[in-house]
Image: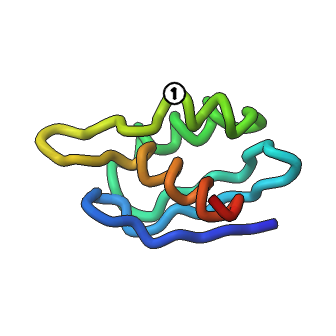
Amino acid sequence: MRHTITTEGVCAKTISFDLTNNIIKNVEFLGGCSGNLKAISSLIEGQNVDHLIDKFRGMTCGNRKTSCVDQLVKGIEKARGR
């Protein structure tokens, strides 16, 4: 199922992803650091979301209190109903 979240406190404006049986696919960040976010999307393709949540929850970017991957975790948790 496709999910799209609006981010808060980061350069990327939205994050879209497919989530099926705890596996993430087709991650797309709109806005932000294009090259880095394309690389992250490629690296996490097909990963179990529990692993991603453990790795990325609470990660910050510069002096911000969040990051694009932390926002992705929040989106995953919302998509899972948590």
Residue at the image point whose x is 18% and y is 47% from the top: 64
Residue at the image point whose x is 80% and y is 45% from the top: 22
In percent of width and height, residue 43 lies at: 61, 30
Does 19 sit left or right of 7 as displayed? right
The number of numbered discs placed on residues in the rendered structure image is: 1
- Regarding mark 1 in the picture, which secondary structure is present there? helix
Disc 1 packing (10 Å; few <14; some 14–19; many ≥20): few
Q: Is residue 12 above or below residue 70?
A: below
Does 72 sit left or right of 49 as displayed? left
Residue labelled with disc 1:
55
Task: Name the residue furthest left.
Answer: 63
Task: Name the residue furthest right.
Answer: 21
Identify the image quadrant of the N terminus: bottom right
Does 12 sit left or right of 10 as displayed? right
Q: Nearer the viewer, residue 34 or 76?
A: 76
Q: Is residue 74 above or below residue 81?
A: above
The amino acid type found where label 1 is placed reads Lys
Q: Is residue 79 above or below residue 77?
A: below
Residue at the image point whose x is 35% and y is 35% from the top: 59
